[in-house]
């Protein structure tokens, strides 16, 4: 979406309106989305289009015709009558066309509204794998289900658009009729909760998912895009789970900065511990607040045990997910494992602990 002010132009003289409209459009700083020749047309245009500002003659802007939008008065000549009318209409500025056109362009550009203010209410959790194959997709999907089963409005975001594992892991449909993160990119800073709701796919276990875009679009997803998506999701839900890929790129850093908890998914092997140690060092060097909490995945009896997590990293794991033979079979069919059994209970306890950390 264009990063310019959206203007409704209210002028009785058609020829003047044409000149002003072409000038503002060519400036690249404002765009006239509608013109009005009387107060009725003006009120209807403001109601339907919700512009950043109304530019026009004070005689047309009365009785609240501009609504709550900024009003910039414009006349072809200066007079006491016109100035008084502009004051009564609550104009933020008064300009004479065409003498003041450069100043008018500045005022129009300055009227552009910033992104809607968002009141964060959600617990935001980032799930990051210490290394490839650690099982972050498994942890993120089952954690989202655990929150949903606790009655929380939970959104799971695929923050690894270049990989796009969530759709396959959850058995989500694919095709042109399925919406994804890619559909939200054109909205930029104007993304709002209603837009996000339209793009979410609902899993039958009750949580909603923002799927990764098609591979051809994934390269266009930037850190700022994920930042806005997380902020919007956090303003309208109870929990947001962000699934990340291995490594520490710009997208991961932005997601870490937006989260309440970073869950590092760790396997009980030397390679997993080494990768997790490197990540912790990188996080400290980049100034990210807060150390990650560890989730041990596929825990089995061996030389390396969950107790070694505390010995190496200074804190015990927040959750230990046992090895479960049913996982591979469920993943092959795009399903989550049964809600019964100790593995599912481990995720319920993890959800409970995460909520306790922010209460």
Image (spheres, rainbow, N blue to C red):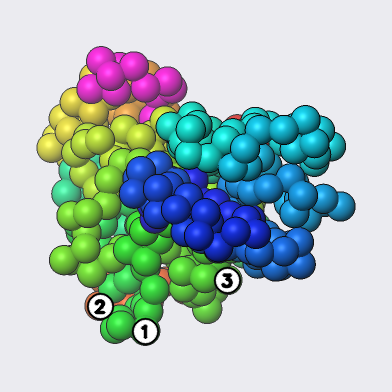
In the depicted structure, whether residue 355 falls above or below residue 206 = above
Examine the structure image and report whether residue 288 is included in the region drawn in magenta.
Answer: yes
Q: Quadrant of residue 252?
A: top left
Crowd class of label 2 (few under 14; some 14 to 19; many from 20; radius 10 Å): few
Please report the bounds of the magenta region as a residue range: 282-292
In the depicted structure, whether residue 140 falls above or below residue 174 = above
Between residue 269 and residue 27, name the one nearer to us: 27
From the top left corner, tell me how far across and down residue 82 is, in percent.
75, 38
Mark in front: 3 vs 1 = 1
Q: Quadrant of residue 280?
A: top left
From the top left corner, tell me how far across and down residue 256 is, in percent.
38, 34
Instruction: Give the mark nearest the N terminus, 2 or 1.
Output: 1
Is residue 274 shown left or right of residue 324? left
Between residue 4 and residue 93, name the one nearer to us: 93
Element assignment for label 3: loop
Q: Looking at the image, which residue is at 50% across and 31% down?
A: 100
Q: Quadrant of residue 95?
A: top right
Q: Which mark is residue 332?
A: 2
Element assignment for label 1: loop
Mark in front: 2 vs 3 = 3
Q: Report the quarter where the C terminus lies.
A: top right
Specify whether residue 185 is in view.
yes
Element assignment for label 2: helix
Mark in front: 2 vs 1 = 1
Is residue 173 shown left or right of residue 269? right
Instruction: Give the mark nearest the N terminus, 3 or 1.
Output: 1
Q: Which residue is mark 3?
A: 206
Instruction: Give the mark nearest the N terminus, 2 or 3.
Output: 3
Is residue 26 shown left or right of residue 195? left
């Amino acid at each position: 979406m264009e990063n310019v002010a959206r203007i409704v132009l209210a002028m009785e003289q058609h020829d003047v309106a044409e000149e002003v409209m072409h000038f503002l459009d060519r400036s690249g700083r404002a765009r006239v989305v509608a013109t009005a020749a009387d107060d009725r047309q003006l009120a209807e245009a403001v109601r339907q289009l919700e512009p950043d500002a109304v530019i026009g003659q004070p005689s047309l802007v009365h009785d609240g015709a501009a609504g709550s939008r900024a009003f910039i008065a414009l006349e072809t000549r200066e007079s006491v009558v016109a100035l008084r009318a502009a004051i009564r209409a609550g104009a933020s500025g008064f300009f004479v066309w065409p003498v003041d056109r450069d100043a008018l362009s500045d005022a129009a550009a300055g009227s552009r509204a910033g992104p809607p203010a968002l009141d964060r209410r959600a617990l935001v959790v980032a799930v990051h794998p210490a290394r490839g194959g650690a099982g972050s997709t498994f942890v993120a999907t089952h954690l989202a289900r655990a929150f949903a089963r606790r009655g929380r409005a939970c959104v799971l975001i695929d923050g690894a658009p270049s990989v796009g594992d969530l759709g396959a892991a959850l058995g989500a449909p694919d095709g042109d009729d399925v919406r994804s993160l890619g559909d939200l990119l054109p909205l930029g800073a104007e993304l709002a909760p209603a837009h996000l709701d339209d793009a979410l796919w609902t899993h039958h276990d009750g949580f909603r998912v923002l799927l990764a875009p098609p591979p051809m679009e994934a390269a266009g997803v930037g850190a700022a895009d994920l930042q806005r998506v997380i902020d919007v999701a956090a303003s309208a839900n109870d929990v947001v789970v962000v699934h990340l890929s291995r490594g520490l790129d710009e997208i991961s850093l932005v997601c870490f900065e937006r989260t309440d908890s970073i869950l590092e998914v760790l396997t009980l092997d030397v390679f997993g511990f080494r990768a997790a140690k490197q990540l912790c060092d990188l996080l400290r060097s980049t100034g990210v607040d807060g150390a990650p909490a560890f989730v041990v995945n596929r825990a089995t009896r061996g030389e390396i045990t969950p107790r070694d997590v505390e010995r190496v990293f200074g804190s015990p794991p927040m959750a230990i997910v046992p090895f479960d033979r049913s996982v591979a079979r469920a993943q092959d069919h795009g399903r989550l494992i049964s809600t019964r059994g100790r593995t599912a209970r481990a995720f319920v306890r993890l959800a409970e602990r995460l909520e306790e950390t922010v209460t």
